[in-house]
Image: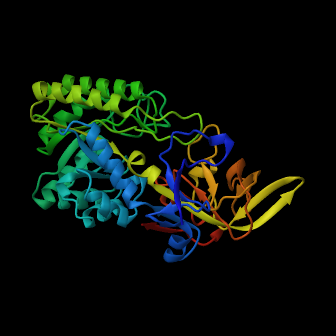
Amino acid sequence: MTETTASVPTSQETAGMAIAPWPRQADGQWRVGDRPLSRVVAEIGGTPCYLLDRRRVTARVAELRQLLPDCIRIHYAMKANPLPALVCHMASLVDGIDVASGGEMRVALDSGMPARHISFAGPGKSEAELMQAVAAGILLNIESFREVDLLTRASDALGIAARVAVRVNLPFELRGSGMKMSGGARPFGVDAERVPELLRQIGERQLGFEGFHLFAGSQNLRAEAIIEAQTQSYALVLGWLDACPVAPVTLNLGGGFGIPYAAQDKRLDVPAVADNLDALAQRARREMPDAHLAIELGRYLVGEAGLYVARVIDRKVSRGDVFLVLDGGMHHHLAASGNFGQVIRRNYPVAINRRTADHETVSVVGPLCTPLDLLADRAELDVAEAGDLVVVFQSGAYGRSASPRGFLSHPDVIEALV
């Protein structure tokens, strides 16, 4: 087939969106891993499915490394997508993996990433998880005074000092963030005003203090907001240096890098953020010479490399409106249905896996017996019939693992790295 390059959106609603283009054949069929989509779907066992393009993930990390100064470490936030094959691939590309549960920790350790480059955050770590992490030699981001007590016991029992960093509930929010993780009362981290007290306890208990974890929020497309959060976070750490048991060796400035999902979204100005990180790294050489700076990214690294694919099982007309009923839906892709943190529902970019002469306005729905099962509301698409494949783009992050797959007991979704 002759191959052309087309931007992801096919509807007028999303035309011009700043999304990296996917290759498309002359007949309109999309290509994944340099193969026709229908062939890849058949190869992995059918629909519904998530497909992660390995080469797009690799390219995204390489592009980011070109922009960032060499001294900035890139960590993969595994909660974005914990698919074991993907995590193993990421382990060969990034400098560290950040996990949020004992289950994720096991996958990260199996990936080949050295334990010294794995960190563990989360406000509700169990005593068993903390013991497991200390035994493995993983860096634990302390989120409460309770964890100091538990880590002291684990260190004594194992005869090794737990490696720890302080996760801070920052006294400000990341403006324009899709999900705010700091500012005000939060379950995440230790309130900034109590950090000196926590540092004193870490020193008294002789835990292995290494630095700070400062994560303000996620899914932000405003470079100036990310720059402000990073700069303020760095300034806070400077104020705590005298209280640290030893000089910090790591400073995780979080992430927040967003990706575009709709026509009005403007791609994040990553070069501007990289310039600020360069400036902070130069300051750190003078002010914290033992410390390295890291950023923690999930969605930005894998979100645009993934597709959700489902098959049309019915084309239904109700009082003049056309509905494409798929064999998959919100139970597999909660975010695309608008029920994963969206305040105002917006369509993800959606397309049919073929090109037709005519277009039509349709709603794309799943098989569940609920009006929430809506993947695209009145989108303009190529004309589709039963049996056609429907593609939801920007689906590499917070997909299968973030969805209520047991709801109404429909079949699970396949996920594969191709």
Residue 96 at x, y percent in the picture: 24, 51
Rendered residue at 24%/58% (across/down): 133
Residue at left 48%, top 59%? 401
Q: Quadrant of the C terminus?
A: bottom left
Comparing 308 with 129, the one in front is 308
Of residue 340 and residue 384, the one placed in the foreground of this image is: 384
Residue 123 in view: yes
Residue at 50% over, 44% down: 19
In the picture shown, does residue 174 fall above or below 386?
A: above
Q: Is residue 121 visible?
A: no
The part of the image, by quadrant, that contains residue 408 is bottom right
Question: Would you identify the image quadrant in which residue 387 lies?
Answer: bottom right
Report the label total: 0
Please tell me which residue is depicted at 10% across the width and 25% down the height of the picture.
Answer: 286
Residue 371 appears at what percent x and percent y?
74, 54
Which residue is most to the right? 319
| Spot occupied by residue 1 in the image (x, y as percentages of width and height) | 54, 66
* On screen, residue 209 above or below 228: below
Instruction: Give above or below for 412 relative to 197.
Output: below
Q: Where does the image place residue 299, in percent across and percent down from the top left?
A: 42, 47
Left of 354 or right of it: where is 197?
A: left
Along the line of sight, the residue nearer the viewer: 258 or 155? 258
